[in-house]
Image (spheres, rainbow, N blue to C red):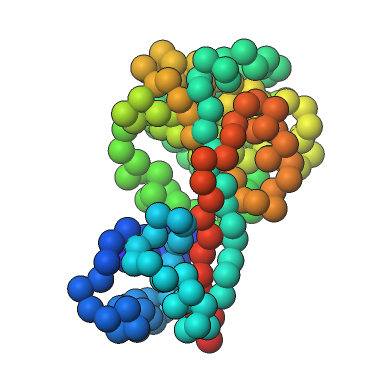
């Protein structure tokens, strides 16, 4: 049961990977009470690997609403390395206040959410790089890469609306791929919402393919 002041669904949801030691209905009520006590929305992150069997149906019967299908996609780094980069990309092992400010501005993140995300970013395990692209002296795109156990994870990619379709996202990905290869990674993964057609098209062109999908169920009443 993950809880982090309500910022991001993933950090504030149950990751259901095992069977509870009590009746399923009691376990669901335990989760409801846990999140209600923290003034958070009771929420589960679910995939085909979720346990116990029948959890998704049980949550639907308990009025948990289906929300936000997300694809987890992967690709080999050797395939991604062939992509062309159109912009210079700066990489840093730590985020700066300027990078964080740009992340908030481009992603329309308020101060409260930004502080929570700052904490999440600061707790990342593994080798990390914070990527950015500038145009006319201003950061117009950012992304985070994490290498762990032979995998490059790509997170938080956002580009300024005024500078989209200029190859910024592609350049950010390409530079992180180069760093990932240098760091010993052989494959990459990312997560993209099913309704984000622009991102899905980009990642399809780069060679990413869906490995599995997950969704959330949350109780709003």
Q: Residue furthest left?
A: 21
Residue drawn 42% across the image and 71% down it = 54
Q: Nearer the viewer, residue 6 or 25?
A: 25
Q: Quadrant of residue 73?
A: top right
Residue 68 locus on image (x, y percent): 59, 61
- Left or right: 205 with respect to 32? right
The residue at the far bottom in this view is: 221
Relative to 137, say whether 106 is above or below: below
Residue drawn where x is 45% and y is 61% of the image: 46
Can I make out residue 127 in this image?
Answer: no
- In the image, what residue occupies the spot 52% across and 40% down? 211
Residue 12 position, x and y percent, is 41, 64
Q: Does residue 185 appear in the picture of this structure?
A: yes
Q: How many marks?
A: 0
Tell me where residue 10 sits by quadrant: bottom left
Q: Position of residue 108 (x, y in %)?
A: 64, 53
Lateral position of residue 179 relative to residue 109, left or right = left
Q: Residue 206 at x, y = what percent?
A: 65, 26
Q: Residue, x 41% and y 79% (percent of image)?
A: 39
Q: Is 176 left, or right, of 5 in this rendering?
A: right
Q: Quadrant of the N terminus?
A: bottom left
Q: Is residue 127 above or below residue 179?
A: below
């Amino acid at each position: 049961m993950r809880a982090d002041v309500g910022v991001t669904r993933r950090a504030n949801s149950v990751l259901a990977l095992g069977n509870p030691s009590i009746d399923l209905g009691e376990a669901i009520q335990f989760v409801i009470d846990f999140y209600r006590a923290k003034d958070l929305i009771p929420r589960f992150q679910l995939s085909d690997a979720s346990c116990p069997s029948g959890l998704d149906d049980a949550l639907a019967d308990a009025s948990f609403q289906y929300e936000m299908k997300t694809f987890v996609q992967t690709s080999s780094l050797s395939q991604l390395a062939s992509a062309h980069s159109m912009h210079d990309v700066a990489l840093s092992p730590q985020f700066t206040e300027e990078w964080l400010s740009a992340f908030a501005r481009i992603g329309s993140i308020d101060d409260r959410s930004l502080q929570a995300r700052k904490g999440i970013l600061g707790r990342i395990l593994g080798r990390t790089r914070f990527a950015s692209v500038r145009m006319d002296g201003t950061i117009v795109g950012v992304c985070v890469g994490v290498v762990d156990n032979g995998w490059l994870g790509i997170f938080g990619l956002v580009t300024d609306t005024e500078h989209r379709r200029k190859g910024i996202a592609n350049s950010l990905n390409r530079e992180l791929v180069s760093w990932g290869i240098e760091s010993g990674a052989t494959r990459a993964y990312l997560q993209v919402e099913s309704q984000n057609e622009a991102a899905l098209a980009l990642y399809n062109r780069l060679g990413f393919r869906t490995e599995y999908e997950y969704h959330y169920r949350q109780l709003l009443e």
